[in-house]
Image (cartoon, rainbow, N blue to C red):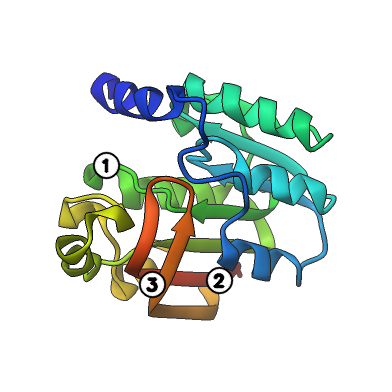
Amino acid sequence: MGEWTDIWNERFRAPEYAYGEEPNEYLREKLEGLKPGKILFAAEGEGRNAVYAARLGWEVSAFDISEEGRQKAVKLAEKNKVTIDYKVGRLDELSFSKDEFDAIALIYAHFPAKIKSALHRSLTNLLKTGGIVLFEAFSKNHLEYVKKDPNVGGPKEIDMLFSIDEIRSDFAGFEILELNESVIELKEGLFHNGTGSVIRFMGMKN
């Protein structure tokens, strides 16, 4: 995990925001239709999505393994005159509570392959019954788009990417409000630019 942490600290150390300061479009669209409550952002990086949710009136918690990411997120929150509770560490090291959140956001939260499904299931324990998961990340078919244009970004290991079946399995027991694979145009900061394939999921915990 140390090497993984170093990679992200290095990326977030630059003054520019790696993925921009504006929220992800799918997250923006879905959050605007939900009543604000308590939300958790996993692998939140430099805070663009968490800060946006706070601007909408959500009570925001976030975590990431990168201290550099947290510092950028706090700075962005101050710029937008909002506050977010941002912790640094792995989920199993942090003190979140069962049934604590009304929503959980996983926006390009690409975890190492060997832990990603277990981590998804751990996160669902933190969600209240009736709570919402919002998810967008690269699909397994995305590697074909990376070959054509590396600027679109994303992991290069297929096991870190997602399929519809994998999401169904990880979030078994959820009511599926939306689940699809889409080809989209990304324009997010320095590292998400171009055409890519993503999985989008919105689910409600039963």
Q: Amino acid at mark 3?
A: Arg
Helix or strand or loop: what does disc 3 sit on?
helix
Give the camera-side residue of 102 and 75. 75
Where is residue 113 drawn, in percent x and y?
A: 23, 47
> From this viewpoint, is residue 172 visible?
no
Q: Quadrant of residue 73?
A: top right
Give the camera-side residue of 108 and 178. 108
Decide which of tag 3 and tag 2 comes sooner along the chain.
3
Q: In 3D space, how far apart are the residues under numbered discs 1 and 3 (Cα atoms)? A: 19 Å
| Label 1 neighbour load within 10 Å: few <14, some 14-19, many 20+ | some
Residue visible at 84% across and 34% down? Answer: 81
Q: In 3D space, how far apart are the residues under numbered discs 3 and 2 (Cα atoms)? A: 11 Å
CB atoms of marks 2 and 1 within 8 Å:
no
Q: Amino acid at mark 1?
A: Pro
Label annotation for residue 112: 1
Mark 2, residue position = 202
Could you tell whether 94 is left or right of 98 in the image?
A: left
Helix or strand or loop: what does disc 1 sit on?
loop
Residue visible at 30% across and 63% down? Answer: 162
Mark 3, residue position = 168
Image quadrant holding the N terminus, namely top left
Residue visible at 50% across and 36% down? Answer: 45
- Is 27 placed above or below 177 here? above
Q: In 3D space, how far apart are the residues under numbered discs 2 and 1 (Cα atoms)? A: 22 Å
| Label 2 neighbour load within 10 Å: few <14, some 14-19, many 20+ | some
Decide which of tag 2 and tag 1 comes sooner along the chain.
1
Could you tell whether 4 is left or right of 125 in the image?
A: left
Helix or strand or loop: what does disc 2 sit on?
strand
Where is residue 110 drawn, in percent x and y?
A: 35, 48
Image quadrant holding the C terminus, namely bottom right
Residue visible at 77% across and 45% down? Answer: 54
Decide which of tag 1 and tag 3 comes sooner along the chain.
1
